[in-house]
Image (cartoon, helix red, strand yellow):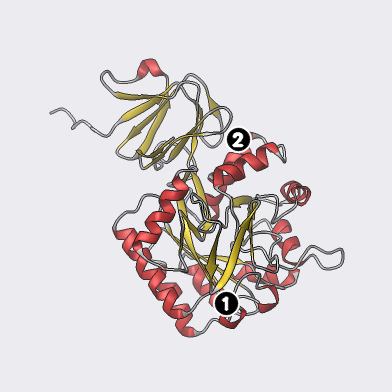
Amino acid sequence: MNAQRDDTAFAVTGARIFDGQDWHAGQALLVGDGVITGIVAPETLPEGLKTVSAKGHLLVPGFIDLQVNGGGGALLNDAPSLEVIRTICAAHARFGTTALLPTLITDTPDVRSHAISAAREARAERVPGFIGLHLEGPHLSVARKGVHDAALIRPMEADDLHVVLACASLFDAVMVTVAPENVTLEQVAAMSKAGITVSLGHTAADYETVATYALAGARTVTHLFNAMSPLGHREPGCVGAALDLGTLHAGIIADGFHVDPVSMGIALRAKVGPGRIFLVTDAMSTIGSDQTGFQLNGRQIFRREGRLTLADGTLAGADIDMLSSVRFVHRTLDVPLGEAIRMASAYPADAIGLSATKGRLLPGLDADFVLLTEDLDMVATYIDGHAVFSA
């Protein structure tokens, strides 16, 4: 008996392919049943196989964004619902993001419950691009709160830990940003053991404290340099710990406003591995929209010249997409294109433990990929082998 034919199988031909490690010219990307099945010579393709011509384009792994507050005019904190998550994912797919964590910043327990319920619906509906949740707060440091509402910041209690631990079995990935000032080592260890990615951020903790929390299970640092103790010549702070400790990965916002390009370059050269610096957008609702501003926890946020700020100038998230972030580190920092793409794909996958399914174009991994022009303009986005956006 002949094996049943996979009617979802196809090949992308003519593109210069980056698999996450190497570039391949004159090859074809094979996709079947939503996963990558190989990169092969075009002459070996099965007769009658459907092909997609991408002559002259780049084919790269889909981008993974672990910190996305909103997009398409929608903000998760504003109205946590299935439709908001769907809107956010669709907005970012237009810029090459094929997997993301909708991010809830510091809010009330009731809003958090609604966000988790919405995320459960998104998982059940298999919303393209949705992989889980990032809870950024409320267990942060008031001293390093940034745009977070100080009145809502508080210590992690037993009920909070129970809610977070319950999320671990619901989604492919869960990230929580916490500060040592408001969580215990035991709480961090419990979350880490459950498979949750614990990220340290919005903290005034010194180097030794960060190192101790990393030993307890913290894996990442949230938006490096921003809302944390700085690198000093006598006290390395959270920034120094993030760069010096190889167990820690670190997200960074590459918009030129949150971190000066010189500091970004220094950090990239200084980072001790195997942990890596990866790109996050920290995007708000403005991405993929014509909004000139919006409300956040009852405060007006202004959109001006690429920045999002409160009236006093405090940065309030970012007005940048992932493809623009890749362009920034490649063109402004002179990071090789392959490395810039890894910062948006392979490295975030590694940081949250999804490297077995996402972040690279290898056999058996999800068929999440992006087609770009040689000038790094969008052509198309594919998630699980399906075209979800075409320019």
Residue 327 placement: quadrant: top right
Give the quadrant of the N terminus. Answer: top left
Name the residue that disc number 1 marks: 139
Is 184 placed above or below 169 here? Answer: below
Front residue of this view, candidates 263 and 77: 77
Q: Which mark is residue 227?
A: none
Tell me which numbered mark, 1 or 2, is placed earlier along the sequence: 1
Task: Name the amino acid, label 1.
Answer: His
Residue 317 screen position, x and y as percent: 60, 61
Tell me the residue at 69%/60% (across/down): 242
Asked whether the viewer can see residue 155, the reply is no
Is 75 placed above or below 107 here? Answer: above
Task: Name the amino acid, label 2.
Answer: Gly
Front residue of this view, candidates 167 and 148: 148
Front residue of this view, candidates 78 and 189: 78
Name the residue that disc number 2 marks: 338
Give the quadrant of the C terminus. Answer: top left
Tell me the residue at 50%/21% (across/down): 56
Mark 1, Cα crowd under 10 Å, few <14 / some 14-19 / many 20+, is many
Residue 238 screen position, x and y as percent: 72, 66
Residue 6 as seen in the image, left or right of residue 172: left
Name the element at disc 2.
helix
Mark 2, Cα crowd under 10 Å, few <14 / some 14-19 / many 20+, is some
Name the element at disc 1.
loop
Residue 7 screen position, x and y as percent: 23, 32
Residue 236 as seen in the image, left or right of residue 161: right
Tell me the residue at 46%/68% (across/down): 78
Residue 368 placement: quadrant: top left
Asked whether the viewer can see residue 92, the reply is yes
Residue 390 placement: quadrant: top left
